[in-house]
Amino acid sequence: MNDNDQPQADAAKDEELKGVPKEFLDEEGELEPPESGDVSEALEALRGDLENAKQEVLYAKAETQNVRRRMEKDVADARNYAATGFARDILSVWDNLSRAVEAIPESLRGEEKMKGLVTGIEATQRELEKVFKQHGIERIAAKGMPLDPNQHQAMMEVPTDEHEAGTVVQEMQSGWMIKDRLLRPAMVGVAKKPG
């Protein structure tokens, strides 16, 4: 063997002994034949290492699965709630259409000149409701319902004997949900016992 072959032989030997625990190598790095007692100890040590490696693989798989689930949920949330900002902004259009319909007196609704205007505003309002429904945007029930701080924002108390205390008796601004999230709370007046 010439001098050029020696580094290749050393590299091959190093590769062959890679991963062998140091207690099985002598001072020169050569594989030392184990004694019979050492074999069983070494076997137990390897079994322990194998068991630890299995546990680490299981933990890594579980973590990967958790990351994948979180990512899937994030993607679903992004898809479901992407229009939240736009929906909040468009609610003011809904409010103005509602005010316009409510502001038209009954006497003008029957007039031939106003019929087209009233019909157009009401049709626009219905179309907006339809689009909201298609995107999972729904109005929160308020009037006659018990006050729910998760959906209603109490703006005032109304003394009355006609309703039980804590019941919504007046809706000043409609509340809305997008899927299962609050888009805007309903601003309401709540009944209280007089005196």
Image (tube, helix red, strand yellow):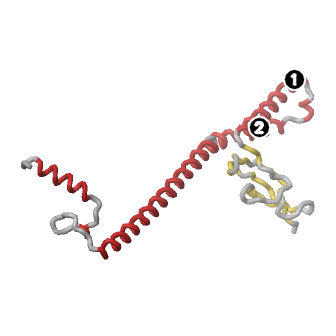
Could you give the CA–CA distance between mark 2 and mark 1, rounded to whole angstroms? 26 Å
Which residue occupies 77% across, 31% down?
124
For marks 2 and 1 on the same chain, the one whose residue lies earlier in the sequence: 1
User: Which element carries disc 1, helix, strand or loop?
Assistant: helix
Residues 108 and 84: in front is 84
Amino acid type indicated by mark 1:
Lys
Q: Which of the numbered marks, if any, corresponds to residue 65? A: none
Residue 58 coordinates in the image, percent (x, y): 49, 60
Outermost residue on the front side: it is 36
Image depth: mark 2 or mark 1 in front? 2
Q: Is residue 55 above or below residue 86?
A: below
Residue 79 percent coordinates (x, y):
61, 42
Relative to residue 153, is residue 122 depicted above or below?
above
Q: What count of labels does the image hold?
A: 2
In the picture, measured across the screen, residue 115 lies left or right of residue 42, that is right
Q: Do the residues labelled 2 and 1 touch (CB within 8 Å)?
A: no
Q: Closest to the observer: 99 or 195?
A: 99
Question: Is disc 2 placed on a helix, strand or loop?
Answer: helix
Looking at the picture, which amino acid does disc 2 mark? Glu
Residue at image x 50%, y 57%? Answer: 63
Q: Nearer the viewer, residue 102 or 123?
A: 123
Residue at mark 1: 113
